[in-house]
């Protein structure tokens, strides 16, 4: 009684190495991204349907940031202060990507040449997914609008890869070789990627680009997450500062997830007066799902960090008044 799914899987000895798990997760993210890029050709995505998806996935990502990524960062070798600092860096970095490559416009004609790294969920792009005559679409959309959007989303997706790799490596340090490591971060990325990739192909279609060119761009974009994951893994694995890098990476990823979710959810309060109850229910469902995912992870990952985990291994600690002191316990005694 009281056993988590993690305990059951662990005892079943269904083991997998972190690099293999990162590869498996990345493969599914690639397929998810490819699916999203081709989704407009298969399903008529109305504004209402998109908002339902956004609310549920936004709630899930918000919960993952707070319930998984941030707490897991505190079980590495970084202090609370450093974790919060890196969370803020992740949030600000994502905010700047959205700011530089566009704003959350809800006007079809306001989708500028820079695009919008998260404007795939606005009225602008949703209207492109509906039955609008080709002549009207190509007349109101610049042919190269998608370039800025694709560039911004590619940078964001590289950071998603970093988050994915950090989540797997962070859990591995506490329960190496078991299944479901980093699963919460993986699920959030997996479900959000189609919303991003379909925005690129929708703008390309509006600009008059052929299906073949849309497919090429979609494939290239889908590879960004695996590249980010591989770069982080090769950069920190088996290095002297691996635990520090993983902790900072997890906190940074928490900031990314929180910013993305809020950038999707907050415009809904201002611009959408319809379907308030179902949208709120889907948001809460996503948050509760994120909370429930903790049962797929090592139980001690959601307990209180030990004294060693709370202590920043960089050799600095803080007194009760917030002043920094060097901890000579980390010095080599000769």
Image (tube, grey):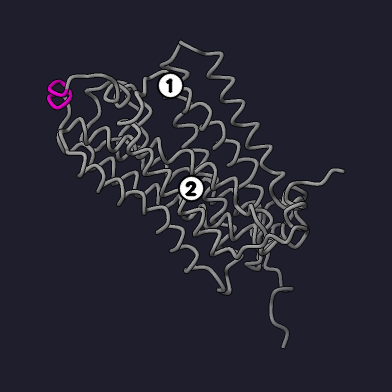
Q: Say whether marks 2 and 1 touch (CB < 8 Å).
A: no
Image location (x, y in percent) of residue 143: 14, 35
Task: Tell me which segment is drawn in magenta.
Answer: 134-139
Residue in front for this viewpoint, 213 or 270: 213
**Residue at 38% from the left image edge and 40% from the top image edge:** 35
The image shows residue 36 at horizontal and vertical percentages of 38, 38
Location of the C terminus by quadrant is bottom right
- For residue 245, above or below residue 60: below
> Across the whole image, how many numbered discs are drawn on residues?
2
Q: Distance between the residues labelled 2 and 1?
A: 29 Å
Q: Mark 1 points at which residue?
A: 49
Q: Is residue 52 left or right of residue 322?
A: left
Name the residue: 66% across, 48% down: 71
Q: How crowded is mark 2: few (under 14 residues within 10 Å), some or many (20 or more)?
A: many
Q: Which of 28 and 196 is in front in this view?
A: 28
Query: Is residue 202 magenta-colored?
Result: no
The kind of secondary structure element at disc 1 is helix
Question: Going from the N terminus, do you reach mark 2 or mark 1 first?
Answer: 1
Q: Quadrant of residue 136?
A: top left
- Assign the N terminus to one quadrant of the image: top right
In the visual, does 269 lie left or right of 307? left
Q: What residue is pinned by disc 2?
A: 90
Q: In this view, does 208 lie above or below 189?
A: above
Q: Main SS type for the magenta part?
A: helix
Q: Is mark 2 on a helix, strand or loop?
A: helix
Quadrant of residue 117 within the rendered picture: top left
Question: Left or right: 295 with respect to 151?
Answer: right
Decide whether residue 137 is among the magenta residues: yes
Residue found at the very far right of the displayed protein: 1
Residue at the spot x=29%, y=38% of the render? 200
Q: Which residue lies furthest to the bottom in this view?
A: 334
């Amino acid at each position: 009684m009281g056993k988590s799914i993690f305990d059951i899987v662990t005892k079943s000895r269904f083991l997998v190495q972190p690099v293999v798990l990162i590869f498996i997760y990345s493969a599914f993210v690639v397929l998810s991204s490819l699916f999203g890029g081709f989704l407009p050709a298969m399903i008529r995505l109305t504004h209402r349907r998109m908002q339902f998806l956004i609310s549920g996935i936004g709630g899930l990502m918000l919960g993952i940031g707070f319930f998984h990524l941030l707490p897991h960062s505190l079980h590495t070798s970084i202090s609370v202060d450093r974790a919060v600092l890196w969370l803020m860096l992740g949030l600000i970095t994502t905010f700047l990507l959205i700011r530089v490559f566009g704003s959350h416009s809800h006007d079809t004609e306001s989708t500028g040449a820079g695009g919008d790294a998260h404007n795939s969920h606005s009225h602008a792009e949703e209207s492109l997914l509906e039955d609008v005559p080709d002549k009207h679409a190509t007349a109101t959309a610049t042919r190269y609008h998608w370039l800025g959007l694709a560039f911004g989303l590619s940078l964001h997706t590289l950071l998603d890869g970093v988050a994915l790799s950090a989540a797997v490596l962070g859990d591995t340090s506490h329960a190496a070789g078991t299944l479901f490591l980093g699963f919460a971060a993986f699920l959030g990325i997996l479900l959000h990627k189609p919303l991003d990739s379909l925005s690129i192909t929708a703008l390309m279609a509006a600009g008059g680009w052929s299906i073949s060119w849309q497919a090429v761009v979609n494939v290239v974009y889908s590879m960004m997450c695996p590249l980010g994951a591989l770069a982080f893994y090769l950069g920190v694995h088996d290095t002297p500062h691996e635990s520090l890098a993983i902790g900072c990476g997890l906190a940074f990823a928490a900031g990314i997830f929180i910013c993305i979710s809020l950038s999707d959810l907050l415009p809904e309060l201002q611009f959408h007066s319809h379907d308030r109850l179902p949208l709120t229910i889907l948001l809460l469902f996503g948050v509760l799902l994120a909370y429930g995912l903790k049962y797929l992870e090592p139980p001690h990952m959601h307990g209180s960090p030990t004294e060693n985990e709370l202590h920043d291994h960089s050799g600095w600690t803080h007194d009760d008044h917030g002043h920094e002191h060097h901890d000579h316990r980390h010095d080599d005694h000769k």
